[in-house]
Each structure stands twice: as structure tokens, then as C-alpha cells.
Amino acid sequence: MALPQPKIDTLEARLGALTMPADGWPRAAREAALERLRAMGLPGARDEYWKFTRPDTLTAPEAPEAALFDAGEPPMFDAFDRLKIVFTDGVFDPAASDDLALEGIEIARLEEAGAADLHWAREVYGTLEARGHAPVPRPLAALNTAYATDGVLIRVTATPSKPVSLIYRHASTTSDAYLHHCIKVETGASLTLLENGPAAARFNNVIEADIADGATLHHVRAQGRDHERRAATHIFARLGEASVFKSFSVTVNGVMTRNETVVEMAGERGVAHIAGASVGDRGFHGDDTVFITHAAPDCESRQVFKKVLRNGATGVFQGKILVPSVAQRTDGYQISQSLLLDDDSQFLAKPELEIYADDVACSHGSTSGAIDEDSLFYLRARGVPKDEATDILTLSFLAEAVEEIEDEDLAGDITARLEGWLARRRG
């Protein structure tokens, strides 16, 4: 079916502002992604999975200006020993980054590895993204595969002694960054991947994660600090037999953030937990869209998303569990909840189950409400000021999502940052 003319015009205007990198082996994947993009067009407000989030600031030819954040807030994850890889406005910063050598792991930059004749990432780059378009198109991910200027390629062969930390810095009010990361976790290996920082005025980020049999990938992401962030992020994960993928995102601040996670559970007894905690204030729009396909039997998935919204903020959750007939004994759980701290904020949810197997345990639920008045009265009756009592109940509400983080120290760090954010708003 031919694209409507408005979609063609939007796409051509966007492509006219971009130049495809002239690298080696990624070129074929880039051209295939561009072909997919031309077939589907950029997202529009009438598209089913964009009806709650306006995509225009993500598809415009030029990035809207975004003021630089006052760096008064302490950096994330600084208390942890980690291998730091820094990008400023989408450009690798070698002076701020650590040596990329670490036992049990191979790390290369996309910009440099593309010149090699042979590289393991050529079997991953663009492959999981391409698979992730069925049955729902992900046009901004295809745009990224075609035009991403850099990223890291991480092959994990054992279990490194410390996490890999991707740090994004924002230095230009008009920067428009595209990063594409490929991660291959080999059989029995394990990796913890951290992401944080204001990346650019507008940020398009893709992670493709191929997790082999018996392998584990833990991902913890902190999106905050920059008040005028516009970001579209994508994670495409494929799980082998008895493999584990756990991803958690905390999102605060930002004008518009759209996080998409697409998981294919291709091997038996796989485990996938996707969770998020959002705290939004005036001008905030946070969209979490998740699609998990149970393509093998005896797999477990969890989606846990909590959003706290006030002063006209908007939270969106779209989550789907697809269970084809082959996926017997599937255990799928999905919960999305919002805490609305005023009458001006809104939570828009679209939970979905599509089940064709007859031996499953799947459930989903979505609720929206205000602070529990009885709990608030209990705290105030014991001398806790109203604003502080509200923050205590807010953190309690978010706790189920934060508890999905495997590492207790990382979970504690995320909780401390949420406490600090709430305290600053209270002040």
C-alpha cells in the first residue's frame, strides 16, 4: 500500500537533513533499514501506537532547541566501580572515557569497527531491529539503523568484574544525536549495562541485545537532569534458552521521552523483566511502550510500570504480551499504575494480552488514582508534614518497580535519586 502524501513529505524532509555514514559492512544493513523506512514512513498522530504521543518533534527536520542543564545535580552511578564510555551530543569523548579493555568482554566503536572486513556485529546490527517491526512498525528505530553515526559494539564472553556504563552528555542546544549499540552476550556469560545522562537536544538511541543460552543481561537506565530533553529510545532483545534479560528505567524531567522495548523470547525457560518508574512535573510527557513475544514454551515475563504525575504532566503506558500456540506454560504478568497528584495530570494506558496457547498464566492490570487519604492522615497525625508525607507515600508507590532491579546497591542509588528529586520539588 502506498504511503499517504503527508507521510511521504514528512519523511523526505527528515531524510534531507541527514547523511548516511559511508562505513563498510554496516552499509548493507543501513540501506535495508532505509528501504523499510520508506515502506512504512515516519510515525504520525493517527498511527495506532502513537495516538497518545505526538511524534512531530521527533520527526521534524531540525531538532528543537533545548537549554543546557545546570550541572548542580550530582552525576548518577558515581559510587560504583564501572567502565565509563562517554558520548557528548552523540560524539565519543575519549578523554572522558576509560580504556575499553576489560576481562571477559570485547568493546569496539561502531564508527571504527565498520571499516573492518569481518566483525561479529555484522550479524547483529539491524537484524533484531528488523525483526522487531512485526507486527508493529518501529520507524524511528529504522531511521536510527540507517543513520546512526556511532555507538558501541559489546561482545561478552564471560562475566566482567564491573558494569559497563554509557554516559551521555549534552553540550549544544541544537544537537541531534543518533547512537546505535549492539550487545552479544555469549552462552553462560553475564553483563550489567548502565545508561545515564542528558544526551542531546534530541536523542534517538537503539540497543540490539542478542542474549545466548544461559546468558544474562541486566540493564539500568536513568533519564533525568535535562528539563528540555526530547528522546526516542529502543531496545530490541532476543533471548535464548534459559537466558535472562532485566531492564529498568527511571525517568524524570524532559519535555518528551518515548521508550520502546521489544523482546523476543526465542528459547525455552527464558526470563524477561521490564520495569520503569517515572516522576513527571509540568511539561513532562513520558511514554513507555513494551511488546513481549513468548515464542517458546515455559518462559516468564514481567512488566511493572509506575508513574507519578503532577502539574499537568502526562504519562503513557502501552504494553503487550503475545503468546502464540507454541508457547505453552507461559507465565506473563503486566501491571501499570499511576499516582495523580492533581486534577490536571493524566495517565493514558493500553494494556494488551493476545493469547493463542491454552496452558498459560497471564494477567494484566492498570489503575490510576490519588494519594490514599487514610495513609496521609496516619502520617500527618504522627507529626509528618503534608509534603514530606506525600513524598513518603510516593516512594512507597514506586517501590514495586524499583525492586525489579537485581542489584540492591543500584536499587538503593535509584531510590536516593528519586528522594532527592522529590525533596527539590518540595523546596
Image: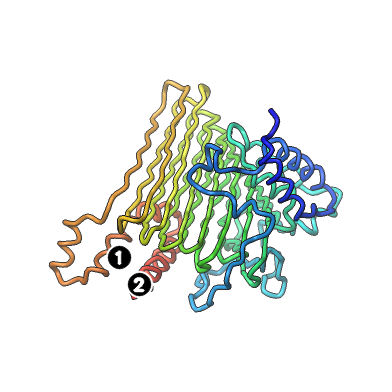
In this picture, is 226 found above or below 62? below
Q: Residue at x 40, y 64 (%)?
A: 412
Measure how far apart labels 2 and 1 are at the Cα level.
8 Å
Dot 2 and dot 1 residues touching (CB under 8 Å): yes
In this picture, is 333 found above or below 288? above
The picture places residue 321, in percent across and down from the top left corner, at 47, 34
The picture places residue 258, in percent across and down from the top left corner, at 53, 51
Specify the quadrant that holds the C terminus: bottom left
Q: Which mark is residue 391?
A: 1
Q: Residue at x 53, y 68 (%)?
A: 226
* Residue beneath disc 2: 423
Q: Work out whether residue 136 or residue 83 is closer to the camera in this orientation and state it.
A: 136
Horizontal relation, residue 367 to residue 91: left or right: left
Q: Work out whether residue 267 or residue 356 is closer to the camera in this orientation and state it.
A: 356
The picture places residue 355, in percent across and down from the top left corner, at 46, 26
Q: Residue at x 40, y 60 (%)?
A: 279
